[in-house]
Image: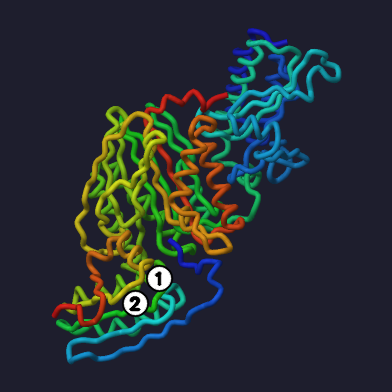
Amino acid sequence: MVTDSGAASLLRLMQASHTATLEELPGMIAEHAAEAGMYDVALFVVDIRETVLRRLTGHGPAAGDDGQEFTVAGSLPGQAYRRVELLSDPGREGTGDRPGGRRWWVAVTDGVERLGVLRADTDTDDEPVRRALRDLASLTALLLLSKRSFSDSFARLVRTEPMNVAAEMQWNLTPPPAYAGHDVTVGAVMEPAYQVGGDAFDYAVAGSTLHLSVFDAMGHDTTAGITANVAVAACRNARRQGASLARTSRMVERTLMEQFGTSRYVTGILADLDMDSGRLTWINRGHHLPLLIRGNRWTTPLACPPAGPMGADLGLSVTVATEQLEPGDRLLLYTDGVVEARDRYGTEFGRDRFVDFIRRHHSGRHTLHETLRRLMAAVMEHHDGKLDDDATVLLAEWRSGRQQELTP
Amino acid sequence: MNTDRPASREQRHPLQVHVRRLRTDRHLVRVVGDLDLHTASHLADVLQPLVLTGGHSVLVDLSDVAFLDSAGLTCLIAVYRTARSTGARVALIAPSERVRRMLAVTGTDQVLHSYASPDAVPD
């Protein structure tokens, strides 16, 4: 049975994990969970495209040998993942040697990014049991995050296809695809996940300012990936020295010209959101205009004259635009691959379908991150599973009052 | 940004470039086909020598270019930059809606002006 020693057990687990490898985590977590009355604990992680949940067994080159796999779209574990919930398995109530017992599936998340699901059996079902399961899943998320950045096994386990060098760079360049804090929720998706060329997104918090940016480097080759890396690094470097948005974009331009002459350029939107006041400041370097979705009432592209792509040296002046957001407003930054993805008949996915999808799926039933997962699945399906161009979406929501949805 | 041909476009359109001298200081370059990763360098080879003389105008007729990708845009931008440094001028003639959209989104239309016909280009 679950006891008050649960918290103490979690603390011991946390301390023991400091010198553990990723491969040792499943065993270590299961052992400590059993002390607290949660048995047969198994950990499943989601692939980078969020289509399957793979068991982290700790064995083999991908730490997943002999592990079961579930689909995100059509399984009970997948449902726990999609809805960010704690679910009891109706097929496993009181079976075997545990009459009255339960089998549970709980989403593993650090409160923002969904990493997978955790399975556990308990003897009873009451509120302390449910709390213990949520706590265990929460700590598990932190342990996974602390190990994955230096684990090749984890990188292998979450890939379902071979990856090209540009994509390898891009996944290490971008921040985690989910953020929540200071009443702002951010989510990002990038496709084709394994063959991405020159797309990148970035966000960062400094005090009450949330920086948001999206980049599209010309080309679809490894050099496009290198170009995007140089652009994002130059942007961060300027930003961290306190440069304004306009000056930051000029420093990106200068760095790109030093590296590539004018043979390579990057379009982009650079924005700062004051999370206290909702005031958005942004500039347009030759990119698709950001879209503002206000409630379910209207959507509008924000206007700002383009100052030319960074690195193209068109010599245009940089205009700084501002917009006052209202609580619940959603801001969409994206690259052309999302709206220009064509089906076999040549029909584009299109901006209307894109916005309509976000509004319909994000109207209460799904979290912002689940909405983006579904959007990319729809874009990929529209394009018969293979995109010609990179497609990136960065979605930010201000003061929606929905952040409690992000934990089970 | 896309440099691949959309999957739905099965037919390739090899690029043809025709140069005609309208007067001593003005050339009309008619481009026929798709301006993309595979063909942009060909156009650049033709255009670059024409913009080396200050005061000269090069009118690039894009009315028969249905498809222009980021490599094609790079070519036009590079020619514009050469012209800017030599004092030559580049103008575009009758770009398609799709090409105009790309020029407008990137801001290139602010430095490369478009005209309906060669006669509409001012001196």
Q: Position of residue A85 (x, y in %)?
A: 61, 25
**Eyeballing the image, is A107 above or below B94?**
above
Going by the numbered disc 1, the residue's amino acid type is Leu
Name the image quarter holding residue A324: top left
On residue A249, the disc is none
Crowd rating for badge 2 (residues with CA inside 10 Å; few <14, some 14–19, many 20+): many
Q: Which residue is drawn at 29% across and 52% down?
A: A284
Task: Determine the chain carrying the residue at label 1.
Answer: B
Of the residues under marks 1 and 2, which one precedes in the sequence?
Answer: 2
Q: In this view, does A260 lie to the left or right of A21?
A: left
Say which of A155 and A304 sits in front.
Answer: A304
**Eyeballing the image, is A19 above or below A65?**
above
Residue identified by numbered label 1: B68
Going by the numbered disc 2, the residue's amino acid type is Leu
Disc 1 is placed on an element classified as loop
Q: Where is residue A175 in the image (x, y as percent from the top left)?
A: 45, 42
Label 1, label 2: how many angstroms apart (C-alpha)?
10 Å
Crowd rating for badge 1 (residues with CA inside 10 Å; few <14, some 14–19, many 20+): many
Q: Do the residues labelled 1 and 2 touch (CB within 8 Å)?
A: yes
Q: Which residue is drawn at 52% across and 34% down?
A: A113
